[in-house]
């Protein structure tokens, strides 16, 4: 059986973090808290501070506190969770015609 693998172009995470804050805010607000949590935990250097800075001025304090509590629980992410979060992010980026 012959299988064809189609690989789509995905923006590097550094390029995502370098988006203008308003664009990044729009993308993050369309994503799930689970997606944001997974991406920050899986890529703290590339996305962590940037995402948290944008969210601090975009969501209610209770929402931000819940996100931080979830991240501080110390649960390990599975590769499937990380992959799912990255897919959700890239789907939103494609829908918004950002990359």
Image (cartoon, grey):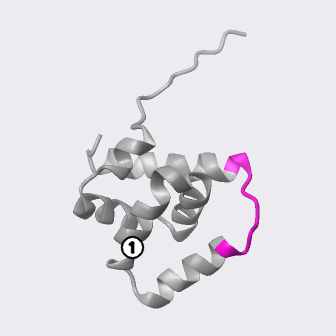
Q: Quadrant of residue 54?
A: bottom left
Q: Is residue 5 above or below residue 85?
A: above
Q: Quadrant of residue 50?
A: bottom left
From the image, which quarter does the C terminus lie in? Answer: top left
Question: Residue 39 vs residue 57: left or right?
Answer: right
Number of labelled discs? 1
Residue plotted at (74% across, 69% down) = 74
Residue plotted at (65% across, 75% down) = 70
Question: Residue 26 vs residue 91: left or right?
Answer: left
From the image, which quarter does the N terminus lie in? Answer: top right
Residue plotted at (64% across, 71% down) = 71
Q: Is residue 23 above or below residue 9?
A: below
Percent across and percent down for residue 13 are 44, 44
- Mark 1 burial class by Cα count in 10 Å: few <14, some 14-19, many 20+: many
Percent across and percent down for residue 10 are 42, 35
Residue furthest to the top in view is 2
Is residue 56 on the magenta stretch?
A: no
| Residue situated in front as seen by the camera: 82 or 87 | 82
Q: Secondary structure at mark 1?
A: helix
Q: Is residue 56 above or below residue 11?
A: below
| Residue situated in front as seen by the camera: 29 or 16 | 16
Residue plotted at (45% across, 63% down) = 49
Percent across and percent down for residue 5 are 57, 20
Write down the residue under mark 1: 55
Question: Residue 16 vs residue 71: left or right?
Answer: left
Q: Which secondary structure is most common in the magenta stretch?
A: loop
What span is in magenta? 72-80
Question: Residue 64 vs residue 95: left or right?
Answer: right
Q: Quadrant of residue 44?
A: bottom right
């Amino acid at each position: 059986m012959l299988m064809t693998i189609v690989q789509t172009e995905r923006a590097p995470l550094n390029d995502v973090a370098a988006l203008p804050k308003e664009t990044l805010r729009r993308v993050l607000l369309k994503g799930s808290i689970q997606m944001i949590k997974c991406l920050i935990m899986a890529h703290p250097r590339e996305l962590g501070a940037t995402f948290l800075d944008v969210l601090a001025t975009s969501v209610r304090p209770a929402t931000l506190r819940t996100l931080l509590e979830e991240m501080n629980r110390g649960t390990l992410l599975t590769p499937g969770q990380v992959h799912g979060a990255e897919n959700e992010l890239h789907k939103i980026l494609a829908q918004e015609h950002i990359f």
